[in-house]
Image (cartoon, rainbow, N blue to C red):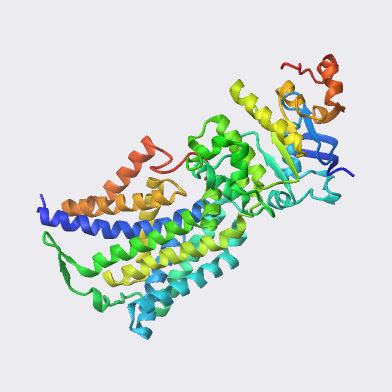
C-alpha cells in the first residue's frame, strides 16, 4: 500500500496527464464529429508540436514566444494537410480516411527522425516554472501546476469558441445532424478547414506544453494517440465535454493505478472502457446516432 | 409564371423509381396540399424540391430560375425551406440556438421576437435544450426555424403527425394565419381535413404520379371523388 503522500502526488500527476489527454482528445473528437474523419495522424501532430517548441525555443529563448510561433506553425500545417490531403477524402470510405491519415502520421514522424535523430531532445522548463511549490500538504513541481492551469485556459478558450460563437453553433449542430444544417442554408464543409486547423493547434499545444516535462522523441505521440482513442470512446464520440471529462478520468486512473502497480494502469483503463461500452455504448456524454 | 414549377421530374431511391414525370406548380401566396397514401411519393417530392434528393431528369424552377441539381444549402439560400417530417431539432442546442442557427444564412431573417409572437411557448422554453422538448414544442420549433428565415416557400412534411388533438388544433390555427397573411406553402398531410382547412389547391398523388388536381373547395364538396382516386377518406 503506497503512502498517502504518494497517492496525493499521483492524483496531481493524474490531473496533469488528464488535462493533457483532455486537450489532445478534444481536438480528435471535434474533428471526428464534424468532418466524420478519424484522424490517425493526431499522435504525430502531438509530437510535431513538441518539436516545434524545441526548435522555436532555441531561436527565441522565450517560452511564450516559442509557444506562439509553434501555434502558428501548427495552424499552417493543419491548413496545408486539410487542403492538400484530408479534403480529398471526405467522400471516401472510412477505411481510406484511416489509411491516409495513418500514412500522414508515419511520414511526419519519420521526417522528424530524419532531421533530429531518434535520440531524446530536451526542452528546458521555463525560468518562471522551475523548482517546487510548497502547498502545505504536498510539495509539487511548479511547472506541472502551471501546466494544468495553461491547459485549463486553452480548454476554456475552446469551450468559448464552441459555445459562444456562430462557428461553434454550426460545428455543434453539424456534429448532430449535418443534413439538417445544409437544409437550413449552411454549407458545413466550409467549416471543415477551420475545425481541422483548430484541432491541429489544440493537439500541437498539448505537445508543446508537455515537452519540458519529458524527453522529446519522434515516438512520444504514440501512447497519447492510443489513450486519446480510449478517452473519446469513454466520453462519447464527437462530444467536447465528453473529451474533457473522459480525459481527466483516464489521467487519474492511469496515475493512481501506477502508484500501486504501473503494469496495471493500462489494464484498468481498458477495463473501464469495456465497462462503459457495456453499460452506456454511446459514451458518458454521447448521444446515439451519427458516426 | 408560378413561383415554383416542378416539371416532369423523375426521382429514384437507389434502383427504385419513386417519382414518374411528376409536374406541379405553386403560385405566389398559394397553399398547395399534396395528398395520397403512404408511399405515394409526397415526402420524396418535398425532399427533391429541397435538393436532398436530385431528380434523375426534369427541372425544378423558382421564379423561373432552375434550382434542381443544387445542394440543399444553396436551395435554402434562394428561399425554399423544408420542415422535415422527423422535425430534426438539434437536441444538444437550446431553442434559441436552433433559431439563431437557422437565421445565420437568411438574407433578411426575422428577429427572434417575431417567432416568439407566433409561438409564445417557444419563448418560455428558449433556454431549454431541443431534446427536452415535447413533440408539439419540437414541431413549433421546426416551423419556427423555417419562419425565421422568411423564405419564399415553406415545404411542410406531415406537420401534425403524432401530436395530441389540442396541439394539432393550435398548429392548424397557426397554419391558417400564415396562409391568411400570404405565405406560400406546400403541405403534405395524412390529416386531410386539417390540410384542406387552409389549402387553396390540392394535388392527389398515387405511386409517384399526379392523379388529381383541383381546388380545395371542389374536393371538399366531393369527398367520394378523393376516395376514389387515392383511397384516403376526409376523416382518415
Q: How many marks?
A: 0
Report the front residue among A214 and A173: A173
Residue B141 located left or right of residue B80: left
Q: Is residue B228 visible?
A: no
Residue A44 placed where, x, y %?
Answer: 42, 65
Query: Of residues A88 and B203, which is closer to you in this image?
Result: B203
Which residue does the image show at 43% across and 77% down from the upper left? Answer: A69
Q: Is residue B36 left or right of residue A87?
A: right
The residue under the point 41% across, 43% down is A285
Q: Is residue A215 above or below residue A10?
A: below
Q: Residue A225: x percent and y percent?
A: 39, 58
Specify the farthest residue to the right: B1
In the displayed structure, would residue A36 be above or below residue B186?
below
User: Residue B143 location, x and y as percent?
Assistant: 64, 38
Residue A213 appears left or right of A5: right
Name the quadrant containing residue B182: top right
Q: Is residue A102 visible?
A: yes
Image position of A62 (left or right of B174)? left
The structure residue drawn at horizontal position 17% and vertical position 58%, both measured from the top left corner, is A9
Residue A7 x %, y %: 15, 54
Image: A17 above or below A62: above
Residue sitting at the far top: B224
Amino acid at each position: 500500500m503506497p503512502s498517502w503522500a504518494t497517492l496525493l502526488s499521483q492524483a496531481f500527476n493524474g490531473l496533469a496527464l488528464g488535462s493533457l489527454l483532455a486537450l489532445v482528445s478534444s481536438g480528435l473528437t471535434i474533428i471526428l464529429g464534424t468532418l466524420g474523419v478519424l484522424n490517425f495522424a493526431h499522435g504525430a501532430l502531438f509530437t510535431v508540436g513538441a518539436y516545434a517548441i524545441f526548435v522555436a525555443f532555441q531561436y527565441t529563448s522565450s517560452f511564450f514566444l516559442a509557444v506562439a510561433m509553434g501555434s502558428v506553425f501548427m495552424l499552417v500545417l493543419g491548413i496545408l494537410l486539410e487542403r492538400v490531403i484530408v479534403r480529398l477524402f471526405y467522400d471516401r470510405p472510412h477505411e481510406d480516411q484511416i489509411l491516409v491519415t495513418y500514412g500522414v502520421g508515419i511520414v511526419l514522424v519519420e521526417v522528424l527522425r530524419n532531421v533530429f535523430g531518434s535520440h531524446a531532445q530536451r526542452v528546458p522548463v521555463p525560468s518562471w516554472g522551475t523548482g517546487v511549490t510548497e502547498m502545505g500538504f504536498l510539495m509539487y513541481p511548479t511547472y506541472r501546476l502551471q501546466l494544468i492551469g495553461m491547459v485549463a485556459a486553452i480548454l476554456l478558450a475552446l469551450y468559448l469558441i464552441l459555445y459562444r460563437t456562430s462557428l461553434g453553433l454550426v460545428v455543434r449542430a453539424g456534429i448532430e445532424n449535418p443534413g439538417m444544417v445544409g437544409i437550413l442554408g449552411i454549407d458545413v464543409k466550409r467549416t471543415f478547414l477551420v475545425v481541422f486547423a483548430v484541432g491541429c493547434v489544440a493537439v500541437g499545444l498539448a505537445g508543446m506544453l508537455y515537452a519540458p516535462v519529458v524527453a522529446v522523441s519522434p515516438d512520444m505521440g504514440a501512447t497519447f494517440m492510443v489513450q486519446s482513442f480510449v478517452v473519446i470512446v469513454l466520453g462519447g464520440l464527437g462530444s467536447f465535454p465528453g473529451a474533457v471529462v473522459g480525459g481527466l478520468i483516464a489521467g487519474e486512473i492511469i496515475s493512481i493505478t501506477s502508484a500501486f502497480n504501473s503494469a496495471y494502469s493500462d489494464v484498468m483503463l481498458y477495463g473501464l472502457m469495456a465497462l462503459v461500452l457495456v453499460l452506456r455504448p454511446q459514451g458518458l456524454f454521447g448521444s446515439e446516432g451519427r458516426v | 409564371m408560378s413561383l415554383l414549377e416542378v416539371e416532369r421530374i423523375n426521382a429514384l431511391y437507389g434502383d427504385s423509381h419513386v417519382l414518374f414525370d411528376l409536374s406541379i406548380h405553386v403560385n405566389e401566396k398559394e397553399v398547395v396540399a399534396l395528398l395520397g397514401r403512404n408511399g405515394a411519393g409526397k415526402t420524396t417530392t418535398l425532399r427533391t424540391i429541397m435538393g436532398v434528393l436530385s431528380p434523375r431528369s426534369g427541372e425544378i424552377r423558382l421564379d423561373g430560375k432552375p434550382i434542381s441539381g443544387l445542394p440543399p444549402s444553396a436551395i435554402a439560400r434562394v428561399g425554399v425551406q423544408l420542415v422535415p417530417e422527423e422535425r430534426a431539432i438539434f437536441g444538444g442546442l437550446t431553442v434559441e440556438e436552433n433559431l439563431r442557427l437557422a437565421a445565420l444564412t437568411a438574407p433578411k431573417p426575422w428577429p427572434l421576437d417575431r417567432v416568439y409572437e407566433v409561438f409564445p411557448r417557444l419563448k418560455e422554453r428558449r433556454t431549454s435544450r431541443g431534446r427536452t422538448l415535447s413533440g408539439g414544442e419540437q414541431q413549433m420549433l421546426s416551423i419556427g426555424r423555417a419562419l425565421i428565415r422568411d423564405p419564399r416557400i415553406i415545404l411542410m412534411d406531415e406537420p401534425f403527425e403524432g401530436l395530441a388533438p389540442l396541439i394539432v388544433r393550435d398548429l392548424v390555427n397557426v397554419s391558417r394565419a400564415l396562409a391568411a397573411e400570404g405565405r406560400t406553402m406546400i403541405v403534405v398531410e395524412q390529416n386531410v381535413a386539417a390540410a384542406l382547412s387552409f389549402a387553396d389547391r390540392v394535388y392527389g398523388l398515387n405511386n409517384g404520379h399526379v392523379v388529381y388536381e383541383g381546388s380545395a373547395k371542389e374536393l371538399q364538396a366531393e369527398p367520394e371523388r378523393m376516395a376514389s382516386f387515392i383511397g384516403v377518406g376526409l376523416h382518415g
